[in-house]
Image (cartoon, helix red, strand yellow):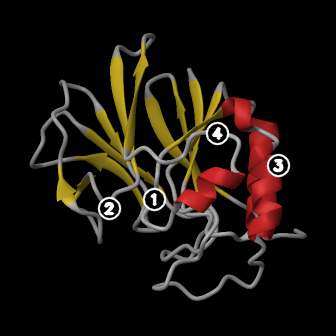
Amino acid sequence: MKLLIASDIHGAADWCARLMVAIEAEQPDRVVLLGDLLYHGPRNDLPADYAPKRVIDMLNSIADQVIAVRGNCEAEVDQMVLDFPCMADYDVLWDPDAGRELFLTHGHVWGPGIHNSVDRWPTLPADAALVYGHTHKKVNGSSDAHPGITVFNPGSVGIPKDDSHSYGIYIDGAFEHRMLSQPGA
């Protein structure tokens, strides 16, 4: 199973276009979107490339590949314009090859308590992964409080708070980060 995992696009159309190039190059089985897709939110500056209608068109073009969860900036109107479900607080995927459960969430309802994610854990089996966004900062590690559980945050596509626009890849039971290049580069 190969997943491309992205979060926190926040309507940044040029960065979303770079993500679309990455999706084409990576050829994942599914694209996991961890919320905050269209709106920049009241705590973030407006991205220079803010164009949510362009982001809608790009994401709808891959709707049949998308698994999405709701971020703290999603609203009913987002679901009205997106061609894939995006209003669930979490989703659970099973990787039969790795024998691993992936708990997918944004990080504001369920999360590992890293950076500004909420510290509220679901019940997870051994060797599971808690995959979240929300903080705009990359994480790939284990939890001292929850031994055997991997925590993974792909960072942010549109408004990174660690100075690098990024997404994640899950393949062969492992997570890794990938950087997006500057638009026009």
N-terminal of the two: label 2 or label 1? 1
SS class, disc 4 = loop
Expressed as whole percent of the image width and height from the top left, the position of residue 117 reads 29, 64
Q: Earlier in the sequence, mark 3 or mark 4?
A: 3
Q: Looking at the picture, does residue 88 appear above or below residue 30?
A: below
Residues under labels 1 and 4: Cα distance? 14 Å
Residue position marked by numbered label 3 in the rendering: 21
**Kind of element beneath mark 3:** helix
Report whether residue 134 is seen: yes
In the image: residue 71, left or right of residue 20: left
Q: CA distance from mark 3 to mark 4?
A: 20 Å
Question: Alpha carbon of mark 3 to alpha carbon of mark 1: how far?
Answer: 23 Å
In the picture, the disc for residue 84 is 4
Q: Nearer the viewer, mark 2 or mark 4?
A: 4
For the residue pair 166 and 43, the one nearer the viewer reads as: 43
Element at label 1: loop
Which disc, if any, is residue 71?
1
Residue drawn at x 76%, y 64% is: 181
- First in sequence: mark 2 or mark 4? 4
Furthest residue toward left = 145
- C-alpha span from label 2 to label 4: 21 Å
Q: Amino acid at mark 2?
A: His
Between disc 3 and disc 1, whose residue precedes?
3
Outermost residue toward the right?
A: 184
Q: Foreground mark, 3 or 2? A: 2
